Image (tube, rainbow, N blue to C red):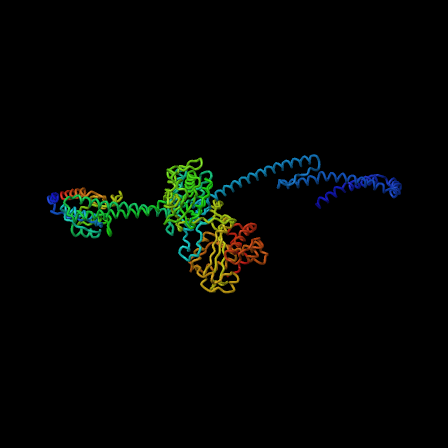
Amino acid sequence: MTTAASPSRDGPAHPKVLIADDEPNIVVSLEFMMKREGFEVLVARDGVKALDAIRREHPRLVLLDATMPGMSGFDVCEAVRADAAVSGTCIVMLTAKGRETDMARGVGAGADAYVTKPFSTRDLVQKVKEMLARDSAA
Amino acid sequence: MRLKGSGLALAVLAPGFALLLWAVLGAGLLFAALDPATRAGVVDVLGPVAESHGMILVLWWALASAGAGLIARRLYSVHVEAPLRLADAARVLASDAAAPALVAQGGAGLRDLAGTVNALAGQLRAQREDMARHIAEASRAVAFERDQLATLMAELQQAVVVLNLEGRILLYNAGARALFRRLSRSPAAEGPPDLVGPDLIGLGRSIHAVIDRSLIDHARETIERRMAGGDARPAARFVTTTALGHLVQVLLAPVRHGDGAGLSGFVLLLDDITDDYEAHARQDRALLELSEASRASFAAMQAALDMLDYPDLEAADRERFQAVVRDEVAAMSTRLSALAADASQDMTTRWPLQDMLGTELVAAAARRIAAETGCEVATAEVDGDLWLSVDSFALLQALAYLARRLVQASASPGLVLRLAAAGTRAHLDLAFRDPEAGRALAGWQTTPMQSGATPSPLTVRDVVERHGGELWLEHPRGVAEACFRFLLPTAMAAAQPPSPEAPAPGESRPAYFDFDLFAASAGSRDSDERLLGEIAYTVFDTETTGLDPAGGDEILQIGATRIVNGRLLADDCFDQLVDPGRSIPEAGIAVHGIRPQMVRGKPAITKVLPAFHAFAADTVLVGHNVAFDMRFLTLKEKASGVVFDQPVLDTLLLAGLVHPGEASHSLEAIAGRLGVAVSGRHTALGDALVTAEIFLKLIPLLRQRGILTLGQARAAARTSYYARLTY
């Protein structure tokens, strides 16, 4: 629990993070872990709800799945980057699409990081913290 | 001969007259030289002598005349008649070296001359025979090559079409015919099922009916560019979609002139890759879906496992994460078993297997085993309806190999072949009575098969894997018998490739090639300039409810056939009954024999005419008294949406040109005059075929009258008496 206090030193006490994924099995673990790491966690179960949540709640960072019903993660990413009010949101795409072309599309559409499933949750937490630190410093 | 006779008489009589004249002149001259007194004395002396003995002088003269006549006759025969005869005979020889040799006659010089002429004629004859032999040999060689090519083409599964530069078809094979039947946008595809769609391909037809002209032009440009760049084997490949959504892959290769310079045509190899493409796309999709679903599952599991690593988890949380792992493991198992079930069917398509009736395979196997081992094989329980998808050669080899091993291991193996369906697959069993024999076959699945003296690189296992099947040695409990059981793929009845229709025995091979079309150049296609013998024709006839189209009579039947390059393509036919949408008068039924129940459910004329229009595309229409039929077609232009605007020729008018003196130009009368056998009269197709044969016989007769081109034929027909009849 010592790490939970660290974000509060250089940012808001509990940075807001949105988890957008339609598979409950992964959301369960991510939500548990992010909360444990001291983040305020929001969950969206499809692309449209994710975009709504981003516009309404202004999370600092989004863990965005690429394949969701309705709006895909790529579409959400493009929409966020096109919307000046939320275009600064950090986006980490977490996706099962592992082809090089998919990766190029994710980065091209504006993802700050593209993480292919499966991944280590520890590495992910590390990456999220680094990105938020860099974001606060900028 | 009369001239010669008078010459002879003149020659024989002339010397007598000459002698008489000579003697009379001599006597006259002597008489005139004497003085009157002496002249009187001579008359006095000779007068009585001439009266009493004058006959002696006359006889003397006659004798001399006869002698001179004989000599003259002989001279005439030798010096006048003999040279004339020789000249005649030599003339005959000059035109026909096979004529009888000259008979030596006349004087020595003339005899010499005859001998020399005979020698010359002999040389000419030898040369001509030599030439004829060469020509015959060359023709035989060409005919042989053509037959080989035709056979090769007929047997090829792949669709092959040869085109000239204009895109007209010179050759196609049964594979192409079957392919184009499938691709055909004929009314049969959407309309009533019994409307036979026109063949999209046929000799002399344009390929552009099936493949977009611009695609072919583009491929041709590619080839020409490559040829210009020095490419030795230029070919272009493209994929096109058809109206019915088929994907057709086309390989287009040039046919070059002998000297390798210019193009003279193209060879097209066509493949319907729809099924292949779909199979591949399906596999790719399955693979992608599997990999993405697996990634997602692994991600959820790993995240859950990471959470389980936290030492201070509440029991409820721990249970939650364990449930995630269990859930994902179950999901992955389900996915994998679904995929395995699907892929196992697809794997069978990798090795080219052919469809074969199970009973045929079993019979062939029994024969082969009996031949190789000398043991009879029983074939008791064989499912007669089962179609297998097999590599029959390899499978027979494997069965024979196993049987041989069994025979070596056991004195009387009691071999039995059985075939039975097993779900979507089939069991092919090679059973044997002696289970001990099975135990002796160590390594039977993976030892290379020995067939006689030649070792085969294949093992039984390889053969099984080719079929995506399985093979095991089964010992049923409680039975003194064991069997090798092959699990083999069955052929779907629907997936059976349409076997190219082979002509029935005795039927002639359908005309699938005509290389003379290579010569057809773009320049000669200017309609009226074309020679009658080189045009593609559609010869047609209709049966109608009556003679008055404007008054409501309708077409009941259309029959047509084609003539290409002076050849009747009797297997390239259009034969269609039409629902007239009205009653059929009894009077007509006696003529055409078409009863109302025969046309019930047949397509209407508005559906049939577009199909007939496609059949007749790019051809000249020919009919007997065709103005009558054309009137029916014209009246339907608006309703059917097709206009028959090609040139039209009428055998009635053309026959009138050839035999202007004849009274009847009915189809039967003309057929009788031209020696055309009439059968199937008063069916549209029967009449069309007779008309076509008549038309073919008319072409050379028209040529004798100086009518060579389509333009000339049309102009001449307009002057014919019958052209003045109108409908």
Residue B122 appears anywhere in the view: yes
Q: Is residue B212 above or below residue B402?
A: below
Give B102 or B41, whichever is nearer the viewer.
Answer: B102
Q: How many marks?
A: 0
Give B687 or B349, whichever is nearer the viewer.
Answer: B349
Residue A55 location (% of width, % of height): 17, 51
Using the rendered view, name the quadrant where residue B365 is placed.
Answer: top left
Give B53 or B657, whichever is nearer the viewer.
Answer: B657
Give B174 or B620, whichever is nearer the viewer.
Answer: B174
Residue A126 location (% of width, % of height): 16, 42
Q: Is residue B85 above or below residue B636?
A: above
Residue B67 location (% of width, % of height): 79, 39
Residue B168 appears anywhere in the view: no
Q: Is residue B351 left or right of residue B18?
A: left
View extreme (left): residue: A9
Q: Is residue B470 left or right of residue B535?
A: left
Using the rendered view, name the quadrant where residue B7 is placed.
Answer: top right
Q: Is residue B652 left or right of residue B433?
A: right
Quadrant of the image for the N terminus of chain B? top right
Q: Is residue B217 left or right of residue B14?
A: left
Residue B551 location (% of width, % of height): 47, 65
